[in-house]
Amino acid sequence: QKEVEQDPGPLSVPEGAIVSLNCTYSNSAFQYFMWYRQYSRKGPELLMYTYSSGNKEDGRFTAQVDKSSKYISLFIRDSQPSDSATYLCAMSHSGSARQLTFGSGTQLTVLP
Amino acid sequence: GAVVSQHPSWVICKSGTSVKIECRSLDFQATTMFWYRQFPKQSLMLMATSNEGSKATYEQGVEKDKFLINHASLTLSTLTVTSAHPEDSSFYICSASGAGGYTGELFFGEGSRLTVL
């Protein structure tokens, strides 16, 4: 079993839809949770960063962490075609980037 | 956010040749840089961690003589794939941190796609 599981998709939604992206994990020691957006043939860029459980909101993006269920989510409201990308979750038990474990990514397409 | 530049963005080479990929932090001093490999529809796999002025730390299963990493300055790290073979074809991505490798201050390059014929 992988430490981090992420549905690869692909996921297609119409413009304006609410998108829900999810990851599950098995290591209960994970405390730092991140979501990255990766456009085709580009490197990842950090979207959301959360420590421990709870919600964090940034514009149209909301990250949720449920440590009791070992489940994290990224919600995108009012999705736009420019949101079309692969979304990677990543997590770590420490603040060190060397211990980051990435999900395999979910490919999202927002149709105009 | 900070800018990390990777060059070349893509390269095609013949089997047996060596290829060098550069990773530069353009607007900050990167004390730690990381090199990853990514296969299609798969997650990023950390290959090695490089700290300026010291030897790189390789992850288990990564051949250090095959993937030479040099971090000679606070703004430049290089990955050299020596005697490349078709199975080395992949997307290589670097990331840089100015805070000793803290997850919240990690910036990625745009990646380099290597194709070995």
Image (tube, coloured by chain):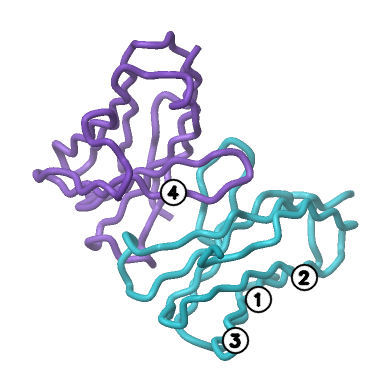
Circle nearer the viewer, 2 or 3:
3
Q: Outermost residue toward the left? A: B53
Indicate the chain on which mark 3 is placed.
A
Q: Which chain is cyan?
A: A
Q: Is residue B50 above or below residue B6?
A: below
- Which image quarter: residue A87? bottom right
At 47% from the left and 36% from the top, the residue drawn is B111
On whether disc 1 and disc 4 are found on a single subunit, the reply is no
Q: Residue at x 40, y 44 (%)?
A: B36
Q: Do dots 2 and 3 share one subunit?
A: yes
Instruction: Point out the tag, 2 or 3, that comes first from the N-terminus.
Output: 3
Mark 3: which secondary structure? strand
| Label at residue B45 | 4
- Amino acid type assigned to the residue bearing label 1 in the image: Thr
User: For the residue carrying disc 2, how many other residues have a C-alpha within 10 Å: few (<14), some (14-19), or many (20+)?
Assistant: some
Circle 1 residue: A62
Q: Please, what secondary structure does the residue beneath circle 4 have?
A: strand
Label 1 crowding class (10 Å Cα cut-off): few <14, some 14-19, many 20+? some
What's under tag 3, amino acid-wise?
Asp
Q: Which residue is mark 3?
A: A66
Q: Dot 4: within a 10 Å radius of its alpha carbon, few (fewer than 14), some, or many (20 or more) residues?
A: some
The residue depicted at 51 percent of the width and 44 percent of the height is A43
Do pointers 4 and 3 mark residues of a single chain?
A: no
Identify residue for label 2: A77
| Subunit under mark 2 | A
The residue type indicated by label 2 comes to Arg
Marks 1,2: beta carbons within 8 A? yes
Give residue A59's position: percent from left, percent from top.
Answer: 65, 72
Which chain appears purple?
A: B
Mark 1 or 2, nearer chain start: 1
